[in-house]
């Protein structure tokens, strides 16, 4: 039974969806102080939040059973993603559920600040009729600069174009081709700032974008520019913008978000040429419903291991096809465990090669699974999974690389992995029989068909008569049953490789006795 804590207000549609699910319980405990959250979080498997809960390293450490943090919304600046990654905790958001609502809010702010909607309403409500004081500016024929051309930025562009605006955008991670498809000119920031009448912010918070609107960037803007922010308050240097609004350099601003929410001692609050709303970007009935349903379904699917959508710290792309990827990841993890059990010294370097249509493009997922398998007995500082295995491997000095130089045998959808350690190396290759059942088909230069599961005795021996009989007799003497015995050899009389599946772990005494058989040159026991 998975336990989920919901620490911020979530739409009733999400709670109703949770009520329909089996194997899940949840508690809604909002407005917890940090101390209360630290005391509450330990028994929970997942935490669902919005923007009100700060999930820092202390909270993640206290969440000893925590596997998933789900953000009902886009921004995750209130989550320490790096700390979550180190602890193997999945961080996910819902990047599409409230896109339309936020884009529409942006246009609403742009129109309202241009036509003095809020102050004109207040004037009429006060019994006044001062039409001449509220002569506004139309959007048609004006230019809009969008900073951050992701999903919401593109929706804003479409709507602004419907008003007859020319749109420029700045986003270093988006190609010019995408801009052309949307009828938008992608430019550098220093080219955008002096060219546009309106600027709208739609970028995520990062070290590069914090206070992207500052004294220097404001100085580059056109005189009388209008600024819209329905993204994140930390994108703006409040003091610099307040100064520009007071001088007239920035004609007006419309703000839905703030550096601290609710705003406290904010120099922008109270300025006559600033329109304020209390973070309403996602506050539509439809968006609230969609984001609540999406986040609970994503979190529960991740807890069950069925699917991992919209994860921010998974070291590989995960989409709707995870069910097809997972068997290959299981195979890769088994290869890693087998390598770890057979290596004579700590593994220092890993090379991985994939051959086949089904595995082509899965190299990052396969690499993460390999590392998880290799590290499974070496890491005891917390949970180990696909999330943190690559990070932990790097910290331990274990490197991994994709290669095409390993001579591969002729199998469809083959995963080959070569590891090296001080004084040696080994190559293993595996496939899925029937698309589901793992098989080891290559061990160094030996070809075989072995089932990598349970207790495995891996033996190399001189290919002489009587070896199999001696091994079988000795195991029987200790009441250890053989499930399967798979063998590979180069040619008669050469050294042979045996991959022996046992029904139980043999005592140390039998392993010592087996190793003393004169024909046995190498013997390793691995539990998979």
Image (spheres, rainbow, N blue to C red):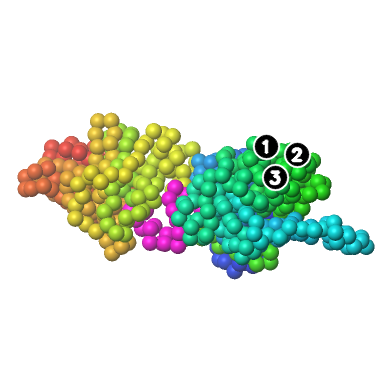
Give the side of residue 316 with respect to residue 98, left or right.
Answer: left
Instruction: Identify the residue position indicated by label 2 in the image.
Output: 243
Q: Residues within 10 Å of mark 1 (few under 14, many from 20)?
A: some
Q: Secondary structure at mark 2?
A: helix
Cα–Cα gap, marks 3 and 1: 14 Å
Instruction: Identify the residue position indicated by label 1 in the image.
Output: 215
Query: Where does the image place residue 94, in percent across and percent down from the top left?
Result: 57, 57
Decide which of 441, 409 is in the foreground and name it: 409
Query: Where does the image place residue 213, in percent across and percent down from the top left?
Result: 65, 42
| Residue 174 appears in the figure | yes
Query: Where does the image place residue 511, in percent across and percent down from the top left?
Result: 25, 40
Q: Secondary structure at mark 3?
A: loop
- Marks 2, 3: nearer the viewer: 3
Quadrant of the rendering where the N terminus is positioned: bottom right
Give the side of residue 329 with respect to residue 356, left or right.
Answer: right
Cα–Cα gap, marks 2 and 3: 14 Å
174 over 138 or under it: above or below: above
Query: What residue appears at the point 57 percent right and 53 percent down from the top-left corner?
Result: 168
Cα–Cα gap, marks 1 and 2: 9 Å
């Amino acid at each position: 039974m998975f336990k989920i804590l919901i620490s911020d207000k979530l739409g009733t549609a999400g709670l109703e969806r949770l009520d329909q699910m089996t194997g899940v319980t949840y508690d809604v405990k909002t407005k917890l102080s940090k101390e209360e959250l630290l005391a509450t979080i330990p028994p929970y498997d997942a935490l669902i939040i919005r923007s009100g809960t700060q999930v820092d390293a202390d909270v993640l450490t206290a969440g000893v059973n925590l596997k998933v943090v789900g953000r009902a919304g886009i921004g995750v600046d209130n989550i320490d993603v790096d700390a979550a990654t180190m602890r193997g905790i999945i961080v996910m958001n819902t990047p599409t559920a409230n896109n339309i609502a936020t884009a529409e809010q942006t246009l609403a702010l742009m129109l309202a600040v241009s036509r003095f909607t809020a102050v004109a309403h207040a004037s009429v409500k006060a019994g006044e009729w001062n039409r001449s004081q509220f002569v506004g500016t139309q959007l048609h024929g004006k230019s809009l600069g969008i900073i951050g051309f992701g999903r919401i930025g593109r929706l804003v562009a479409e709507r602004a174009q419907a008003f007859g605006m020319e749109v420029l955008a700045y986003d270093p991670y988006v190609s010019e081709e995408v801009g052309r498809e949307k009828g938008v000119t992608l430019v550098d920031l220093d080219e955008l700032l002096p060219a546009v009448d309106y600027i709208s912010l739609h970028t995520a918070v990062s070290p590069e974008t914090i206070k992207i609107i500052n004294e220097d960037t404001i100085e580059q803007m056109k005189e009388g520019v209008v600024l819209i922010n329905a993204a994140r308050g930390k994108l703006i240097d409040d003091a610099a913008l307040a100064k520009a609004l007071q001088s007239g350099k920035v004609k007006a601003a419309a703000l839905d978000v703030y550096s601290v929410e609710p705003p406290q001692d904010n120099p922008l609050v109270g300025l006559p040429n600033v329109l304020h709303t209390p973070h309403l970007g996602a506050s539509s009935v439809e968006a609230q419903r969609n984001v609540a349903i999406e986040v609970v379904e994503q979190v529960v699917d991740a807890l069950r291991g069925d699917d991992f959508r919209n994860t921010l710290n998974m070291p590989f792309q995960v989409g709707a096809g995870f069910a097809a990827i997972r068997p290959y990841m299981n195979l890769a993890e088994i290869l890693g465990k087998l390598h770890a059990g057979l290596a004579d010294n700590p593994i220092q370097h890993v090379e991985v090669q994939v051959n086949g249509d089904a595995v082509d493009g899965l190299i990052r997922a396969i690499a993460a699974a390999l590392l998880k398998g290799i590290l499974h007995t070496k890491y005891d500082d917390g949970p180990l999974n696909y999330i943190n295995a690559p990070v932990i491997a790097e910290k331990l000095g274990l490197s991994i690389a994709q290669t095409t130089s390993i001579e591969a045998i002729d199998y469809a959808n083959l995963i080959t992995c070569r590891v090296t350690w001080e004084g040696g190396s080994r190559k293993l290759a595996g496939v899925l029989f029937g698309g589901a059942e793992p098989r080891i088909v290559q061990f160094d230069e030996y070809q075989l068909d072995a089932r990598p599961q349970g207790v495995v005795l891996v033996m190399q021996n001189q290919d002489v008569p009587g070896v199999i009989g001696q091994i079988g007799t000795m195991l029987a003497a200790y009441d250890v049953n053989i499930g399967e015995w798979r063998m590979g050899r180069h040619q008669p009389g050469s050294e042979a490789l045996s991959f022996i599946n046992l029904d139980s772990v043999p005592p140390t005494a039998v392993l010592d006795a087996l190793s003393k058989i004169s024909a046995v040159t190498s013997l390793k026991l691995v539990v998979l």
